[in-house]
Amino acid sequence: APDRTVCFSEIFKVLKPGATFAGYEWVFTDKYDVSNPEHKKIMDGIEVGNGLPDTTPASDVVDALVAAGFDVKVCEDLAPASEVPWYQPFLPDYTLQGFKTSLWGIKATSGLVAGIEAIGLAPKGTAQMHGHLYTAAETLCEAGKLGIFTPMLHFVAVKPAGGRKGAK
């Protein structure tokens, strides 16, 4: 949602007092440098390729939950503790199964998508959307390798039982 506080406030309204709300958010990490043009280019690619609003730091998630009235119990990036990197599916793999992530696989898929669009088997714009999805995969992989982005910010928040507004 473009405005997390509005979204979380709507969730807050429908929960019973004492209820738990948990989720994951996509955020940039502390390694993200807003003044680094390469970081900015990667983040722009993630946002365009995945149709996301502006990506923010984890602290914005906590702030939005608190502003909506929740007590935040947990807010933690689970990516560093993962045995397999979250971006593993996007890494180029030159095997039969991993062909789709290789440069040749991407070129072949792009050509096929453009071809089926050109002959009318796919709607106009399909090839452009395929390009956006490729951008998403490429920039997610780069961001993961650099550690500047995580799709695994896990949070747990509770609607206070006594009607008290959120606390950090």
Image (tube, grey):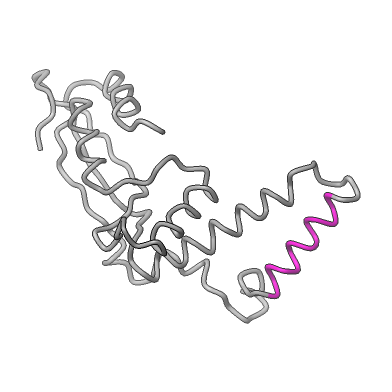
- Residue 165: name its quadrant: top left
Asked if residue 74 is positioned above or below residue 159 in the image, the reply reads: below
Question: In which quadrant will I find the C terminus?
Answer: top left
Q: Is residue 54 magenta?
A: no
Q: Is residue 152 left or right of residue 59?
A: right
- Residue 162: name its quadrant: top left
Near-viewer residue (9 or 41): 41
The percent coordinates of residue 88 (x first, y second) are 47, 69
The percent coordinates of residue 82 (x first, y second) are 32, 67
In percent of the image, x 27 and y 63: which residue is there? 31
The percent coordinates of residue 132 (x first, y second) are 61, 52
What is the residue that sits farthest to the bottom in this orientation? 94
Near-viewer residue (22 or 107): 107
The range drawn in magenta is 104-117
Asked if residue 89 is positioned above or below residue 135 in the image, the reply reads: below
In percent of the image, x 65 and y 69: which residue is there? 100
What is the residue that sits farthest to the right in this orientation? 119
